[in-house]
Image (spheres, grey):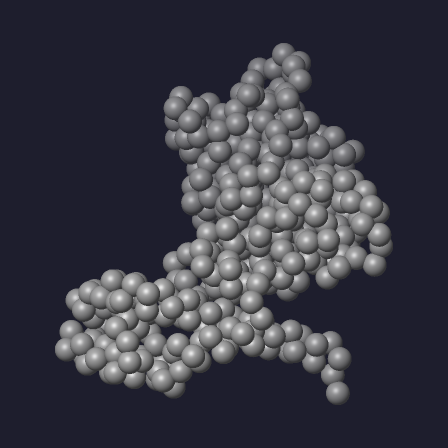
Amino acid sequence: MNQSVVRPARPSPPPVAAKPLTPAAAEAFERKLNSLALSGDGWLAVLRAVTHHTGRPARLVGVHGGVLAATDDGTTAMTPVSVAQVFAKDGPATVICEPGWSATARAVRAGERRVGLLLLGGAERRADLDDDDVLLRAASTAIAIEAIRRDAVAAASTETAGRLIDELRFGALRNHAEVLRTAARFGLRLDQPHAAVVFAYGGPNQRTWSTALSWLEMPVRQDGQFGLAVLEGDIDREISRIRVRLQGMVGDELVLAAAGPVVSDVRETSRSFRDAETVLGLLRRRPGEVELMFSSLGLAQLLFGVSPERLQAFVEQHLGPILEREEWVTTLSAWLATKGSRAAVAELLHLHRNSVGYRVGQIRELLDANPLDPEVTLRLQAALTARELLSVLGEDKGCRRGNDSAQHPG
């Protein structure tokens, strides 16, 4: 279910004259809005009731900053940071979504989960905030009720969607035509170019992480801190859009995203999933990066198709004499990356320039080659890439053994 699509606003009845709500009137107004939510009329019906009462536009903005529903034609998103700043306040806040459009905003929660911001347009004076907040608080419960209803609907479809992702990830027992038909019911065209993707979040808000994954508009399988899915179309743009949305909902530790190779046959989708998990392992070794595509790996793309045994033999052939000294391997990698700049390597590894010179001298002697010779450089870069890939594959195998032991103890 696509939670971020804004439905076209139908013409609302002429608004009544807005006036401050007494406590009794506020309670009655809240009951009216709750009744709309409980009847399943949705967020837009609640917002229209607020607009009808005030004569002012109302919007609901998700925690990732996108407009979930609106009584005007506003589609301008807020940044996740701006949303988080409102959530950090105890009461109402004034926000500016676009030039000339300011609003009173209140954070809406459903239990521990953040739903989004309820905005009432036309805020002009600080004195307006208190009156606006009475209205926004009256509407917040109805918004939360609809969020809970949507969660229930999402949970009902998650199991079926998860089974489909499992089939695509591990291989289907059904014939391929049946898998294609099932995927088509979820909007996936697996006979067209597509790629497996893995999102990862290791932070403390695991319940929010589960909710965030269930709200995505495509089939997703949650596997602990991982969310696995299949994307089509402009995969680079889509994976960035979804990662930012997930990050906005969990809000603390970084969400990572990795994509496997693009394939056009459902029989190749499981390979794309395997490679996506390995790409994620490579991403985790790149501090500061949050997204990595198989298509951007360069030389490593070729090495994905080589058996671990052949990779290991290649690494030992070209790096064997220095493999027992990790600091030498690190120095060689930095030396090649900086094209032999002693000053750059010293700064990168926090070493004295003389120490860099000593290490490089030792590496030249042990390898009996000049690392900056173009032909030697190519071989050494391939060997370093193969070593990194072997390390990630070893970690993946260890994780799988651990998972198997946990599921089948003794």
For the point 29% across and 63% down, the residue is 374
Work out which quarter of the rendered image holds the C terminus and state it: bottom right
Q: Is residue 252 above or below residue 264?
A: below
Q: Position of residue 293 (x, y in %)?
A: 50, 52
Q: Is residue 145 above or below residue 28?
A: below
Task: Tell which of 95 and 295 is nearer to you.
Answer: 295
Is residue 392 rendered to the left or right of residue 274?
left
Q: Position of residue 200 (x, y in %)?
A: 55, 59
For the point 65% across and 78% down, the residue is 401
- Tell me if I can see residue 377 in this picture: yes
For this orientation, the residue located farthest to the left is 354
- Tell me if I can see residue 147 in this picture: no
Q: Position of residue 248 (x, y in %)?
A: 51, 48
Work out which quarter of the rendered image holds the N terminus and state it: top right
Q: Position of residue 249 (x, y in %)?
A: 54, 49
Q: Is residue 345 above or below residue 73?
A: below
Q: Is residue 246 above or below residue 44?
A: below
Task: Tell which of 209 and 290 is nearer to you.
Answer: 290
Task: Tell which of 242 and 401 is nearer to you.
Answer: 401
Could you say which quadrant of the image residue 331 lies in? bottom left
For the point 41% across and 62% down, the residue is 286
Task: Tell which of 235 and 370 is nearer to you.
Answer: 370
Q: How many numbered circles does the render carry?
A: 0
Could you say which quadrant of the image residue 123 lies in? top left
For this orientation, the residue located farthest to the top is 14
Is residue 20 rendered to the left or right of residue 181?
left
For the point 55% across and 33% down, the residue is 67
Is residue 260 rendered to the left or right of residue 43?
left
